[in-house]
Image: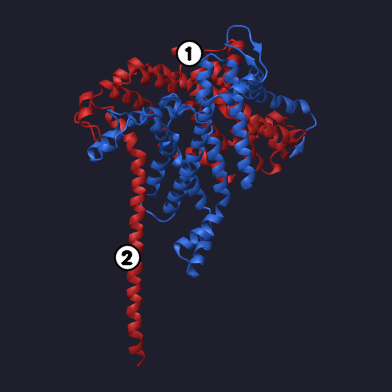
Amino acid sequence: MMGNKAEPREAATVDRDAVAKTKRKLRRTLVYIILILFTIVNAYPIFWMIMNAFKTSQDFSLNPFGLPANWVFENFQDAWVTANIGTFFFNSVLVGAVAVLISIFSGALAAYFLSRFEFRGKKFIYGFLVIGLLIPIHATLVPMYILMQNLGILNTYWALIFPYVAFNLPITVFLLTSFMSSFPKEMEESAIMDGCGVFRIFWSIILPMTRPAIATAVIINFINNWNEFAFALVLISDEALQTLPLGLANFAGAYTTNYPAQMAGLTLVLVPTIIFYLLMEKQIVEGMTQGAVKG
Amino acid sequence: MHLLRSPWKIGLGLVLPLIIYMVFGIIPIFISFYYSFMAWDGFSAMSFVGIENYITAFQDSTFWLSLRNNILVVLASVLGQIPIGLGLALLLNRKIKGAKFFRTIGFLPVVISTVVISITWRMIYNSEQGLLNNLLETTGLGFLQQNWLGDPDSAIFAILITIVWQFVGLYFIIFLSALQTIPKELLEAAELDGAGEWHKIVHITLPSIRNVILVAIVLCISGSLKTFDLIYVMTQGGPAHSTEVMATYMYSETFEGLSYGYGSALSILILVFSLILILITTKVMGVKRT
């Protein structure tokens, strides 16, 4: 009696389970399709560019979408020689690295006093430094040009280094101050007992402990400097001092008809960026997103 | 935290960053403000013209066009990048094969220099050799082909698409990390109560990351107000000013038109517009930054 009643119900459950399973499977497939589409839209333009850098002009016009019929490297030679990419690369690394050093060192020092001490005007100074995050950089292009001219450093590396430091200080101070504030205040107490000076404590206790946040700040600073275009455009006219984004824009402007050569120039710049990204993905992504997630 | 009795040490620590920040970040704005009341070609003597540069700006149709385009960039970014990024994050926020791969590729455009992206997309949109027209031709949609950046009607939309493309990944990853902080128990409890996928998203997931969404919107607005490189490289504001934003217009007026006074006035207007917009959004949405 009992068995008779139970049977149809069991069958219905199995049926419903099967429907739910197919539904879930369908939904999963749909999710995959959307994600794969997104990946193609994201990656294909870059892939298209890199592949065409290896084609002859003729191969490119016959077969613009896929892999090269024969892999040729002349375009890279062309781009490297005519575009001066080596020089631009050197300039970018030099300007970027010096600016990062100054920005991190001075930013860390400021963050140290702003996070570990009480003094009058502290909140004001912190707010004043951090509000720089909101200043649209290009609103300062005109006065910066005039200022650099008056200081006599227009068309030198310093003309880029100083603005790069100034515009990276807000994010640097923000990141480092919030990190240093999280240390317990007993941290320095024994050092003070031992008679260590304020700067000694900074150098040998606080700075080493801040290493993870400093790594993040270095990465953000460097990426910002590496990609910066507007200041370089306005403040540097000497070709020998141009950084990669500016040099590349000029090169592509001069080579508008020869696409494979343009693409080779872009690829030469892009490949190190991609390698750097794949190696440091975790830190880069964290650095560029944590402001929002923790905000 | 301790009270430091020797203020000169604090001064010593803060002096270097404050000087660099003031001289190269803040003071230029005041210089700009000063020059905005002058007529000056950069070489000969300046003359004081009062608020004439501002009056000129308000009567300048290209200025209004560039302001409109700035607003379009903000709208496209907020209405494009944020919803698409959020949607993708919701899709990827589950056990999925290749999740890491989708994240890596998703974020890739964000780290590429804007100049590289601009040149690449300029080639994609090219009317003869460009990827887009080639694709349309091959798929039998040849009748849709356009001179995307050469036609004043389509150029700004072509640029908006590139801008959305460039930064979707940023918001995708921001939202994904936020979603992963939601406690599993919360969602499991809802599941036991028989809540469906959609119900969970609307009543649990989205409210839990509300603040991150608001901060992302502010970030997105302030980021899109900084648009300059992309448009400068792709179209230089053309054709016929159709893709001009305030920053590119300011650049060409100052450094090509040699009107330093007018360019300075435009700089100040950019600053004022940006700060007002950011202030309003922060206030309206009640974002609290820690």
**Tag 1's secondary structure?**
loop
Whole-percent x and y of residue B2?
76, 38
In the image, farthest residue toward the bottom: A1
Q: Residue at x 50, y 24 (%)?
A: B248
Q: CA distance from mark 1 to mark 2?
A: 64 Å
Q: Is residue A134 visible?
A: no
Q: Is residue B193 visible?
A: yes
Rate crowding at label 2 as few (under 14), some (14 to 19) or many (20 or more) other CA atoms within 10 Å.
few
Q: How many marks?
A: 2
Eyeballing the image, is A158 above or below B225?
Answer: above
Mark 2 lies on residue: A22
Rate crowding at label 1 as few (under 14), some (14 to 19) or many (20 or more) other CA atoms within 10 Å.
some
Mark 1 lies on residue: A237
Which quadrant: the N terminus of chain A?
bottom left
Chain of the residue under label 2: A
For chain A, give the colour.
red
Eyeballing the image, is B34 above or below B1?
Answer: above
Whole-percent x and y of residue B114?
44, 30
